[in-house]
Image (tube, helix red, strand yellow):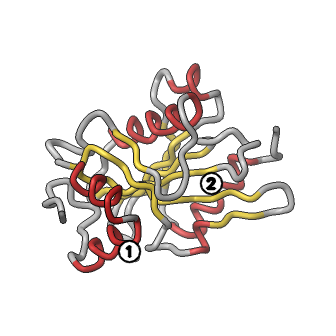
Amino acid sequence: MRINNYKEKITNHYERLWGGKYSALKEKESTAKLGIDFTVLEFSPTLDRDMWTYATIHMSPLDDEPPLELHMFSSTQDRSLVELLTITSFYHQKRARLNLNHTINFGRPWQGKSACEYGFISLPYLDGPDLENFTDEEITVKCYWLIPVCESEVDYRSKYGTEALEEKFDQECLDYVNPNRDCIV
């Protein structure tokens, strides 16, 4: 399926919500593995938002129902997050479809020596439905938040459910941009 100006539409969607300057980035081998249009945008901090934001474009084939895009946050500029989003997108396209409330093993720490080696796909609570739901006359896209989590948090979610994990995040005031945070369970 081809959507007119999909990349431009999703870029404008992100830019409207996050503002700031951005760069379009790719892993060297991502074009061969994920297609020429796959890109990760890196948004710099703004006066209203003091973190870096990394977001996919063309993570899903456009005939997915609905296509997904993911984003991550960081307290520092970190191009290794382009790799994590590329790996996640590859897994989604070539291995098993990901969706809301799924987890993925990154196969390495999120940043530095972080205990967070997994990602949890969540609603974009910081930006709400305005970010989550992109719809125009051609397509509806879901834009979700990929939150780095520890193995014990993945296990907790498996045992007690997504809502219980998110309640723990709220109770403990999860520091979602701190790679050195303690696991909350």
**Residue 27 percent location from the top left of the image:** 45, 29
Three-letter code, disc 1: Leu
Instruction: Give the secondary structure at mark 1.
Output: loop
Numbered mark located on residue 83 in the image? none
Q: Name the residue under label 2.
A: 11
In this view, the residue in front, 46 or 129, is 129
Horizontal relation, residue 165 to residue 140: left or right: left
- Neighbor class of circle 2 (other Cα within 10 Å; few <14, some 14-19, many 20+) is some
Instruction: Give the secondary structure at mark 2.
Output: helix
**Residue 66 percent location from the top left of the image:** 70, 53
Of mark 1 and mark 2, the one earlier in the sequence is 2
In this view, the residue in front, 24 or 181, is 181
Horizontal relation, residue 43 to residue 178: left or right: right
Decide: is 60 above or below 134.
above
Q: Mark 1 points at which residue?
A: 47
Three-letter code, disc 2: Thr
Q: Which of marks 1 and 2 is in front?
A: 2
Quarter-of-image position of residue 135: bottom right
Residue depicted at x 23% and y 41%: 109
Which quadrant does the N terminus fall into? top right
Task: Measure the C-alpha gap from mark 1 to mark 2.
Answer: 20 Å
Residue depicted at x 59% and y 28%: 34
- Neighbor class of circle 1 (other Cα within 10 Å; few <14, some 14-19, many 20+) is few
Horizontal relation, residue 24 to residue 140: left or right: left
Residue depicted at x 59% and y 42%: 59
